Amino acid sequence: MTIVAVIPAYNEQSRVAEAVRDALLYVNYAVVVDDCSSDQTSKNALDAGAIVLRHMLNRGQGASLQTGTDYALENLKADIIVHFDADGQMQGSDIQELIKPILDNRADIVLGSRFLGDSIKMPLSRKLVLKLGMLFTLCISGIKLTDTHCGFRALSKKSAKDIVITRDRMAHASEILDLIKVYGLRFVECPVTIKYSPEVLAKGQSSWGALVIVKDMLKSKFLDV
Ligand SMILES: Nc1nc2c(ncn2[C@@H]2O[C@H](COP(=O)(O)OP(=O)(O)O)[C@@H](O)[C@H]2O)c(=O)[nH]1
Ligand SMILES: [Mg+2]
């Protein structure tokens, strides 16, 4: 079994090395997709033992996950792909439980859930936005989940081939849920711990970003763009 962590990264020079080292304790390869960072993200990821791919333009987290996945399937012959963040919010030690349903052939994709696990120091406003996201996804995609926008996931080779992400930026999380339905993939949720600190909240997505995702989803759903 070849397990590959795909790690999208944008200006994460102070956090990416630690995230790569943490992931590499539980996977065979870490593929960091540096999305035209203006800092030392690529160098620090490489020094920590990652394979580093670099976009010439900033294309977004969704596009970077697709670049890393294409590479992992073609060049590393990945059996399982784990989506893992570069900023240290996710814990490598959750990977074993996350990939288990795929190893046991009970699921094609495993979705991390902060609400089944732990969302340490998550602000209340973020919690509310995520709960609304859950309701929204239930209405739009008909998929009932406790956490619809957690970026920590594991995909079997089959689901990684089926799920081709075309939403370049943050709406990819909703697109993945749509494609689970389209391809009839077996999914389960798995508790994960996501840590929040003032530093990662300052540089991470704002709760308003959720509105942009909703706009993107509605556009793709009803205007077919
Ligand atoms: N490749 C790429 N990664 C990004 C981009 N924006 C954020 N990321 C990475 O995606 C992950 C999650 O982003 P973050 O902003 O922390 O989102 P949040 O945790 O949901 O607030 C981190 O590893 C970021 O470095 C981007 O434009 N391109
Ligand atoms: Mg983050």
Image: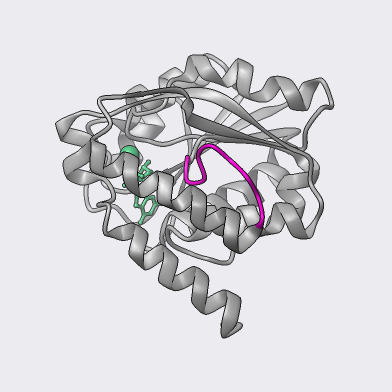
- Provide the residue span drawn in magenta: 142-150
Location of residue 17 with respect to 225 vertically, above or below: above
> Would you say residue 119 sits in the magenta stretch?
no
Residue occupying the far bottom of the picture = 223
Rendered image quadrant of residue 89: top left
Rendered image quadrant of residue 109: top right
Front one among 27 and 103: 103
Location of residue 134 with respect to 223 vertically, above or below: above
Which x, y percent locates residue 217? Answer: 51, 69
Front one among 225 and 27: 225
* Quadrant of the drawing holding the C terminus: bottom right
Residue 211 in view in this figure: yes
**Residue occupying the point 43% across, 61% down:** 169
* Quadrant of the drawing holding the N terminus: top right
Picture mark count: 0
Residue 1 in view in this figure: no
Which x, y percent locates residue 160? Answer: 71, 47
Q: Is residue 202 left or right of residue 186?
A: left
Predominant SS of the magenta segment? loop
**Residue occupying the point 77% across, 60% down:** 182
Which x, y percent locates residue 204? Answer: 26, 45
